Image (cartoon, helix red, strand yellow):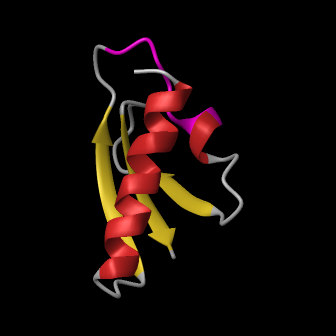
Amino acid sequence: MNNEQVIKWVELIESSCTDLKIKHIDMIIDQAGSDFSLLPTLTNFETAIQWLKTFLKKYFWRMRRCL
């Protein structure tokens, strides 16, 4: 996964939520076994994405996307 793929993925989620009139979405992302970190990409969005660790290890993130 690269930055372009992440941006397209989030844009698709945002578009779907807009169509369905959903104001926020909670995501759990498992990054175990991946060398690609989503955090740099997600923190660059114009509408801030709040995130927090759900486990002591850095592999799982719970993010709330407000639309």
Picture quadrant of residue 50? bottom right
Main SS of residues in magenta? loop
Residue 25, by quadrant, is: bottom left
Residue 10 horizontal side relative to residue 21, left or right: right
Q: Horizontally, is 39 left or right of 29 in the view?
A: right
Question: Could you tell me residue 67's position as x and y percent?
Answer: 51, 76
- Establish if 45 lies above or below 65: above
Q: Is residue 58 visible?
A: yes
Nearer the observer, 24 or 7: 7
Q: Is residue 7 above or below residue 23?
A: above
Question: Is residue 53 in sight in this rendering?
Answer: no
Q: Picture coordinates of residue 41 (x, y %)?
A: 60, 37
Q: Name the residue rendered at 49%, 54% in the picture.
A: 52
Number of on-image labels: 0
Does 9 lie within the magenta span?
A: no
The quarter of the picture where the N terminus appears is top left
Q: Determine the residue positioned at 66% across, 66% down.
A: 47
Up-down: is 8 above or below 54? above
Indicate the position of residue 64 as horizontal and vertical percent values. Answer: 45, 66
Please provide percent x and percent y for residue 18: 40, 78
Q: Is residue 36 above or below residue 51?
A: above
Picture quadrant where residue 58 is located: top left
Q: Residue at x 39, y 38 (%)?
A: 56
Report the front residue among 66 and 60: 66
**Residue at the spot x=48%, y=21% of the render?**
2
The magenta-colored residue range is 34-40
Foreground residue among 45 and 49: 45
Query: Is 39 within the magenta?
Result: yes
